[in-house]
Image (cartoon, rainbow, N blue to C red):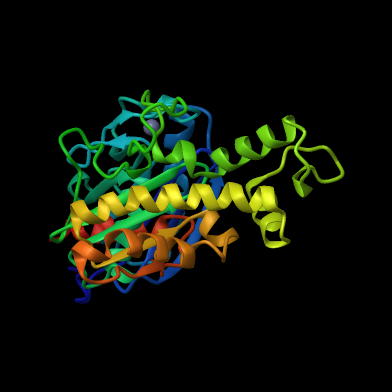
Amino acid sequence: MVDTKNGAPVLGLDIGGTRVKAALVTREGRITAATQIDTPAGFEGMQQAVARILQELSTHTSGVGGLGIGCKGIINPQTTRVEVLPGTLNYLEGHLLSDLVPSTLCPNEQIAADNDARVALAGECAWGAARNRQNVLMFTLGTGIGGGILADGRILRGTTGVAGHVGHLTIEPDGAACICGNFGCLETVFSARAFESEAWAALHRGVETRLGGTDGKRPSCADIFECARLGDPVAYRILQIATRKLAAGIAGLVHVFDPEVLIFSGQIVESGDSLLVPLQNEIAARTRRLLRRDVPVVRSELADPSGVIGAAALAIQLDH
Ligand SMILES: [Zn+2]
């Protein structure tokens, strides 16, 4: 899928709530120059800042072969329009991401844009754990759950660009209210936020646990993994129950999409070495009978927490 001819390097741009990151990336997925800035507070500031960092990166090459943009929210990949984007980046809603890019640097037809989770999967397809695969489910486990679905060789977008929001799979019909308007979504039971609120609720009930620490601060997701590792039964149980629910949700998706591999990335995967083995075992136990095989659970292979390599992969796919 990736053009490895003598093509010019491409630019990858990742627009996040706190940082905007950009890099010049070769056709082999190698970063040759990179930069980042604090996220500006308005559209004009964003336009000026993005133009500046992209111009700066383009001085490292004699020609730019395309540009890919990853951004939170619902992005129309045909037009690069930001359709829905709640939160601090709300000012981008209704704008074309291609309007952030100076026309002298890259013509519109060489600009690709998509939701950041789908961009991460595009990167894995080009140079990572989804390379040469046709059917893959990817999960980014952090403050929420992001995801992407590669089905029969295509990254699914759906009718309105929402496809792949695996964090909003209903897991408890009468569960907690979710930011999406539904109740009991997967990310209300398995996410940094969900663990932290469970831990806080346990402390509030006066349960005996190491989770309170000595400073009285609310335990973070990393604190909960650490307490579980040290044998705290309350922390351990919070993670055990949540992992079982995550596995149950993923087992449903495995039956629907029949993937070759399940790829995991994100802050929780980094902080919880003990997570992936029990997760794989539980998913396998729930799916083995129909699939007659165990679907491998692997970590993301791209050292790309910044998202810029995935964004570059998007630009290269546009060539085809
Ligand atoms: Zn939801």
Quarter of the image with the C terminus in it: bottom left
- What is the tally of numbered marks visible in this picture? 0
Give left or right: position of 265 versus 160: right
- Which residue appears at 40% of the width and 68% of the height? 298
Q: Foreground residue, 135 or 116?
A: 135
Question: Residue 60 versus residue 244: which sits nearer the camera?
Answer: 244
Q: Horizontal and vertical percent for residue 200?
A: 68, 35
Ligand 1 image position (quadrant): top left
Residue 181 found in image quarter: top left
Could you tell me residue 126's position as x and y percent? 27, 67
State the image quarter where residue 1 is shown.
Answer: bottom left
For the view shown, which residue lies furthest in the right direction?
A: 214
| Front one among 312 and 128 | 128
As rendered, which of 302 and 222 lies closer to the eye? 222
Does residue 202 appear in the picture of this structure?
A: yes
Q: Is residue 68 visible?
A: no
Among the 4 quarters of the image, the one containing residue 208: top right
Answer with left or right where residue 224 lies relative to residue 286.
right
Residue beneath the point at 48% across and 64% down: 278
Give the x, y percent position of residue 272.
Answer: 57, 60
